[in-house]
Amino acid sequence: MEFTLLWAALTAVTATWAGLRIWDDRLPARADDHLLAATLWGLVVGRLTAMIAQGVNPLTNPAEIIIVRGGVATPAAAATFVAVLVWSTRTLPGAVDAIAPAVLFGLAGWHAGCLWRGACLGTPSDLPWAWALPGSAVTRHPVELFAALGLALAAWLVASLPWRPWLRSGVALVMASGLRLVTDLVRPSLGDAVEWWYFVGVFVGLGAIAIGPLLPPPRQGEPT
């Protein structure tokens, strides 16, 4: 049985757990539960979307739903994660802003999990930081590690931002989408088209930053 995907997922979970402990200011109660529920819903919807796109009927092939290695539709999974997290914390002002750094740190852990899967490398490069797969003479960019480092730094940056409604969440979404967009330049691809959902993520994040100041202030005693 192949366990490398499991180790990568556990790396992401551990990084998220660490992020919640490092940046615990104004975290809502049971923040772990909110993140777990959003992640599970994201995986399920992303997996179902991928199956349908591949022409596999989930109703007649229910056993294939749990075969995550068969593919998960990233846009559907990400959108579901964000929607469930926002909805589940709708009565907790500032909750998503408080959780945002840990989410970025968890994403950094997922990308760093490429070390378990042997899938860190991107396009060929002769630069000093490039390395080759065992048995290959072609050196390549360690693109997934670039992404991991960028997301970890983004987590620290977001955690240092002031408490303004949706500011941290918006910046986190902009940085996560933007970093993925930039690292795609040195990530192996079967085509030249840039994935559209990265741009959607950037614009949604900018929208959250813009509308934050227009929202009514929280009631007395609530986090800002």
Image: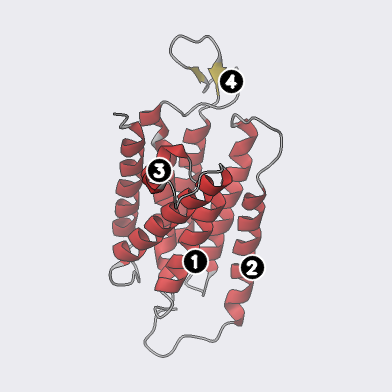
- How was this image coloured? secondary structure
Specify few, some or many for label 1: CA neighbours under 10 Å numbering under 14, 14-19, or 20 or more.
some
Disc 1 target residue? 83
Query: Which residue is found at the position 54% from the left and 86% from the top?
Result: 216
Disc 3 target residue? 64
In the rendered structure, which disc, 3 or 4, sits on the residue that comes first in sequence? Answer: 3
Specify few, some or many for label 4: CA neighbours under 10 Å numbering under 14, 14-19, or 20 or more.
few
In the rendered structure, which disc, 1 or 3, sits on the residue that comes first in sequence? Answer: 3
Work out which quarter of the rendered image holds the C terminus and state it: bottom left
Query: In the image, what residue type sits under mark 1?
Result: Ala
Query: Which residue is found at the position 48% from the left and 45% from the top?
Result: 72
Q: In this view, does 106 lie above or below 128?
A: below
Point out the residue furthest to the right here: 192
91 and 84: which is toward the camera? 84
Select label 3 or label 4 by which is in front: 3
Q: Which mark is residue 127?
A: 4
Disc 2 target residue? 207
Disc 1/disc 3 C-alpha distance (Å): 25 Å
Disc 3/disc 2 C-alpha distance (Å): 37 Å
Query: In the image, what residue type sits under mark 2?
Result: Gly
Judge left or right: residue 206 versus residue 4.
Answer: right
20 and 77: which is toward the camera? 77
Select label 4 or label 2 by which is in front: 2
In the rendered structure, which disc, 4 or 1, sits on the residue that comes first in sequence? Answer: 1
Q: Where is residue 49 in the image (x, y as percent from the top left)?
A: 52, 51
Disc 2/disc 1 C-alpha distance (Å): 15 Å
Query: In the image, what residue type sits under mark 3?
Result: Glu
Dot 3 falls on a residue whose secondary structure is: helix
